[in-house]
Amino acid sequence: MSVAGQRLGITQARVSQTISALEDRFGTELFARDRRPLDLTRSGQILYEKALTMLEMEEEIWNSVRSIASVKRPLLHVAGATSFVDVVGGSLLARVGNLADQWRVTAGLTPDHVMMFLARQVDMIVTIDDMLEQHVGLKRYELVREPYVLAVPANVSNDEAIEALTKTKPLIRYGRSGGTGRQTIRHLARMNIEPIKTIEIESVFAQMTLITQNQGWGLTTPLCFASTPAFHSTVRLVPITRGSFRRQISLISRDREDDEATKEIAEASRDLLREEAFNQLIEEYDWLEEQFDFF
């Protein structure tokens, strides 16, 4: 009894009380107290043997559950907004590539990704849209909330010139097929803003090319801008001073499916978005820092 108490870190009296409680519960004696040295009864021996089996099972279960997070998946398929994939996709795989033997990363428009996700053709999606809000059984990891900004030619340097630009040149924005385009359209409608002309184009590169060539002005986000570093010297970002709005980027997966992997991918994505997408932009545009929400 004394040795048992020392091993368990409890008093001898507590050991005795526990044994008495077990005997009351099973309605039989576990120790033959009339023998010296103290010995187990037949009931006590059975309980002892069964307890050893249970402890072995507990250890096996513990090891199985603990190791499942380290088991590689045969394939992980992630779909994400093109700007996200372009900016952090490569670095993300370098950090979490050990989670699967094979990877497939699909870039494109949110509606396409939502359909693929609901059809179980992808394991998780990085999205900025709210198209899955009504679906149950999903898990959402918020990555970052970023502002919409104006993109103007770099040679347009003052507020008066910017105002003149927005009143005389067309708005170049993303089309309504994607979540960013639809969000932009809704916000402009709420603000009763009607540009003299609108050019819809589903390409950040093409949008920046047109702005560089003084063909108009644009609505974009820091992440989209970060995906086109070749234009950082010819296009300038300007805050929206009236009716500013933002978009939230989230990683969505199925609840209780690949939870450990999804959590690791979300954490790595948050770090990379800040390190590789936004830190350099914040250094150049210090007003941006207060407009981000990092989770």
Image: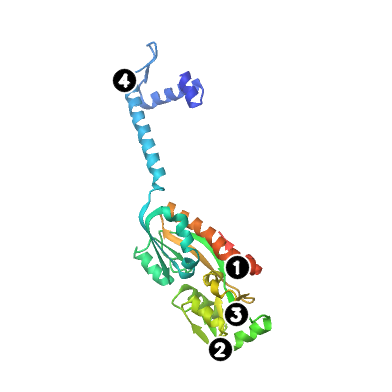
Q: Marks 2 and 1: CB-CB under 8 Å? A: no
Front disc: 1 or 4: 1
Indicate the quadrant where residue 151 lies. Answer: bottom right
Question: Which of 47 and 219 lies nearest the eye of the viewer?
Answer: 219
Task: Give the percent coordinates (x, y) of residue 80.
Answer: 44, 66
* Mark 3 surroundings: few (<14), some (14-19) or many (≥20) residues within 10 A: many
Residue drawn 48% across the image and 23% down it: 5
Which of the two discs, 4 and 2, labels the residue nearer the N terminus? 4
Residue 269 shows in the view = yes
Measure the alpha-carbon separation of dots 4 and 2.
94 Å
Q: Secondary structure at mark 4?
A: helix
Residue 256 shows in the view = no
Name the residue beneath numbered marker 4: 42
Which of the two discs, 2 and 1, labels the residue nearer the N terminus? 2
Front disc: 4 or 2: 2
Amino acid at pointer 4: Arg
Name the residue beneath numbered marker 3: 152
Task: Give the percent coordinates (x, y) of residue 133.
Answer: 45, 65
Name the residue beneath numbered marker 2: 196
Task: Give the percent coordinates (x, y) of residue 210.
Answer: 53, 82
Q: Which mark is residue 90?
A: none
Which of the two discs, 3 and 2, labels the residue nearer the N terminus? 3
Front disc: 3 or 2: 3
Front disc: 4 or 3: 3
Name the residue beneath numbered marker 1: 281
Residue drawn 32% across the image and 24% down it: 46
Which of the two discs, 1 and 4, labels the residue nearer the N terminus? 4
